[in-house]
């Protein structure tokens, strides 16, 4: 249901070509926000932008995407995104640092390259984006920043020492940024999700990101989507009365609520949104 909760806002959402980021972009557009789609995947990013405009012809979209220009690990890309948003939308009021990836191996077999890529995307990428939007938000004297973490960042996951470390690092990053930016009326928070039904946890093979093949989830968690879904559901108390684990659309609803100006006094907080998967 569209009630214009985010009317007049301008949001940058990283990793918004697909999955959770795409769902956030669509819901934000529906609620009246301009959206900048930033991702490595240009084709899917353009599709998301088109779908946002079809949902709400009153909003504007910008796409900063592609293997070179959409990569948040490079500060110049993040700066370009922030400047484009300012030029086209007139400012940036919301940033969702959602882009992320998993490259899973037990620590003793994990390459330095896989360690560095996950650190770069999750931690350095989020830092780059905050650094790029901060001057604009400071000038506006308003901003709302959310970093996307995971239960792995608190509980740790076997074969995810890189991902768990990076997602945990987002907590310190969030708290430091919250302290720095609060005097300019900018809130910064971090949310750790449990299982959200996207390609990241679905049975898949051979997904390539930044030249690296993500872990073969068919080998790790099984071949049959229904079985994998059942496995996740079994570990989530709130799933008892749902057909599926959390879906990207559910996560998007969460962000509409916390990015509305009604929740702006919330800052420096680390929360888990997992249906009880982690308490
Ligand atoms: N799906 C889950 O169960 C789950 C749980 C906890 C946290 N998360 C987090 O939620 C976020 C979104 O995950 P998802 O499940 O939608 O995954 P996804 O793979 O469907 O989408 C992630 C997007 O990020 C983009 N991306 C990756 N590296 C990038 C880079 N360097 N620059 C720009 N874009 C980049 C990818 O191209 C992709 O479009 C991630 O941070 C992930 O760690 C997901």
Image (tube, rainbow, N blue to C red):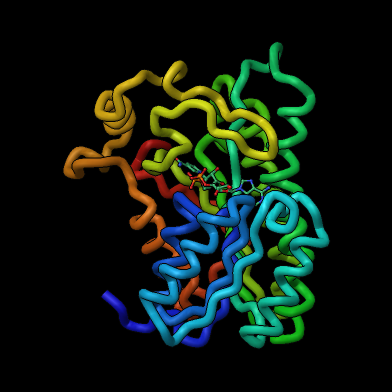
Q: Residue furthest top?
A: 108
Q: Quadrant of the N terminus?
A: bottom left
| Front-most of residues 155 and 38 | 38
Q: Is residue 16 above or below residue 182?
A: above
Q: Is residue 272 above or below residue 200?
A: below
Q: How many marks?
A: 0
Residue displayed at 73% across by 71% down: 133
| Front-most of residues 98 and 199 | 199
Q: Residue furthest right?
A: 76
Residue displayed at 51% across by 87% down: 8
Q: Is residue 97 visible?
A: no
Picture coordinates of residue 180, whole percent (x, y): 77, 67
Q: Residue furthest front?
A: 43
Picture coordinates of residue 223, whole percent (x, y): 35, 20
116 relative position to 5: left or right: right
| Front-most of residues 223 and 46 | 46
Picture coordinates of residue 268, whole percent (x, y): 62, 61
Q: Quadrant of the C terminus?
A: top left
| Front-most of residues 82 and 239 | 82
Residue displayed at 50% across by 56% down: 21
Picture coordinates of residue 211, whole percent (x, y): 69, 34
Q: Residue 174: name its quadrant.
A: bottom right
Residue displayed at 81% across by 58% down: 75
Q: Is residue 205 visible?
A: yes
């Amino acid at each position: 249901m569209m009630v214009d909760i985010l009317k007049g806002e301008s949001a940058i959402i990283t990793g918004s070509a697909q999955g959770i980021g795409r769902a956030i972009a669509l819901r934000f557009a529906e609620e009246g926000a301009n959206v900048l789609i930033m991702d490595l995947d240009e084709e899917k990013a353009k599709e998301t932008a088109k779908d946002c405009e079809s949902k709400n012809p009153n909003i504007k979209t910008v796409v900063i995407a592609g293997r070179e220009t959409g990569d948040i690990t490079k500060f110049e890309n993040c700066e370009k995104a922030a400047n484009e948003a300012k030029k086209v939308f007139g400012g940036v009021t919301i940033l969702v640092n959602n882009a992320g990836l998993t490259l899973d191996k037990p620590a003793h077999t994990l390459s330095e390259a896989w360690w560095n890529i996950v650190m770069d995307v999750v931690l350095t990428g989020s830092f780059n984006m905050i650094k790029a939007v901060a001057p604009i938000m400071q000038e506006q004297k308003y901003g709302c920043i959310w970093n996307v973490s995971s239960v792995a960042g608190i509980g740790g996951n076997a074969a995810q020492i890189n991902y768990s470390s990076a997602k945990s690092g987002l907590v310190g990053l969030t708290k430091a940024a919250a302290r720095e930016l609060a005097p300019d009326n900018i809130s910064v928070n971090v949310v750790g999700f449990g299982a959200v039904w996207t390609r990241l946890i679905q049975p898949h093979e051979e997904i390539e990101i930044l030249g690296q093949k993500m872990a073969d989830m068919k080998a790790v968690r099984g071949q049959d989507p229904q079985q994998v879904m059942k496995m996740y559901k079994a570990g989530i108390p709130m799933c008892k009365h749902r057909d599926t684990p959390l879906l990207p659309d559910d996560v998007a609803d969460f962000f509409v609520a916390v990015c509305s100006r009604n929740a702006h006094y919330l800052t420096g907080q680390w929360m888990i949104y997992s249906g009880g998967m982690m308490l």
